[in-house]
Amino acid sequence: MIYLDNAATTYPKPRSVHNAVMRAMNNYGANPGRSGHSMSMASALEIYKCRETAAEMFNAPGAECVVFTLNCTHATNMVLKGLLKPGDHVVTSCLEHNAIMRPLKKLEEFGIKHTVAEVYPCDNDKTVDSFRKCITSKTTLIACTCASNVWGIRLPIERIAALAKVYGIMMMVDAAQGAGVIPIDVTESKIDYLCLAGHKGLYGPMGTGMLITSRADKLNTIIEGGTGTNSLSFYQPSDMPEKLESGTPNVMGICGLGAGMEFVKQRGIKNISKHESQLINYLYERLRKIKNVELYMPKPDEKYFAPLLSFNIKDKDSESVSNILNKNGIQVRAGLHCAPAAHKFCGTLEKGAVRVCPSAFTTRKEIDRLVSIVKKI
């Protein structure tokens, strides 16, 4: 089997992640911070270590800024529904995943409006200016992706965050497709809310995600419950991270996520990005020489694109192509990728696209095999 669906979830996971999950199953089976016995305290310590790892990787002010979530979608909803109030206005991009677009659509029911800014691939000046033109006197938040999960287009999030600060508004970044392959510094870039998927470029298990923020004071909670602290009160604690974490955490998943981040740290984000980008550029060059293969982006420069590539074969539905690839032992994702806005951007709403995304473990030989089957199709 050749697995090239890493934009959805990375596979395989590093051996260290497997080991961390099993170690947690064996040694950290008690609720962290809920009891005074040794296993509970050991579980709490392991969770704290993972917070520290995440805070270091993304240069957060402290471990208390790291909130564990179910996934990136959970994190984006916590921000959008916890921050925005009736009458507020949001600026987003034309490439967004439904993790942003669906909450924004729901919030329209409460008088919260949004404007979609056009993105110009390989022209950051025009993209930033597009965002600027969408800002109004009621704009509270800019919420956008770090990189498109369909086309790989990178948004200049540092410049957009700087723009937000000029206008005194908040900035939220959906880094599901960027974390682990694009360096992100929340302090230097002044990103207020960084939403992360643990199971993609951070190589953690599914069911893990994070929200990194030092601006939790601006958020209303959307979930309240047991935190193991201040249990006498019926009110949710205001201290972080307890304010945004309720109920028993996914200890085994979080331990695996910590090991995944350590793997990325040891390999180096730049090295992983270089490896994956070289494979995508190699694939691009091979595909553009094949008759009837449709490519929608220019050759993906690492400065402007995350390492993934979507394509179609003329007169063939993307799902049909994916099914043929699957029968030949190659696993990719086709369809709309939960991002109809991005497909509208390139005119592929009707047929979708075939998406290829390598990982740190993908080889050139596997890309060659993919190309050989595409040629036959």
Image (tube, helix red, strand yellow):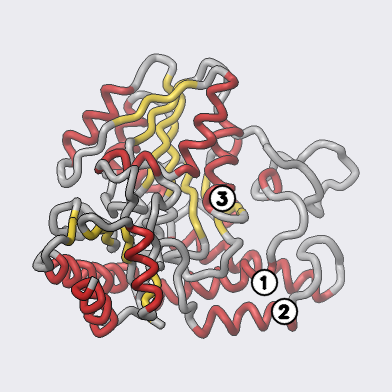
Name the residue: 69% across, 68% down.
Answer: 251
Q: Residue 330 shows which numbered tag?
A: none
Name the residue: 17% across, 34% down.
Answer: 126
* The image quarter in which residue 285 lies: bottom left
- Given the image, on which type of amino acid does mark 1 rest? Met
Q: Position of residue 295 (x, y in %)?
A: 18, 56
Q: Secondary structure at mark 2?
A: helix
Relative to 350, say whether 20 is above or below: below
Q: Secondary structure at mark 1?
A: helix
Toward the viewer: 190 or 300? Answer: 300
Q: Farthest right residue? A: 232
Q: Secondary structure at mark 3?
A: helix
* Residue contact between numbered discs 1 and 2, judged by CB atoms under 8 Å: yes
Q: Residue 25 shows which numbered tag?
A: 2
Query: Mark 2 or mark 3, which is nearer to you?
Result: 2
Toward the viewer: 305 or 356? Answer: 356
- Given the image, on which type of amino acid does mark 3 rest? Cys
Q: Position of residue 238 (x, y in %)?
A: 71, 39
- Given the image, on which type of amino acid does mark 2 rest? Met
Toward the viewer: 116 or 236? Answer: 116
Q: Label 1 to label 3, Cα distance in Å?
A: 21 Å
Q: Label 2 to label 3, Cα distance in Å?
A: 26 Å
Name the residue: 69% across, 50% down.
Answer: 245
Number of numbered discs: 3
Q: Position of residue 214 (x, y in %)?
A: 53, 43
- Residue holding disc 3: 65
Q: Is residue 218 visible in this depiction of the protein?
A: no
Relative to 187, say whether 273 is above or below: below
Name the residue: 29% across, 45% down.
Answer: 348
- Residue holding disc 1: 252
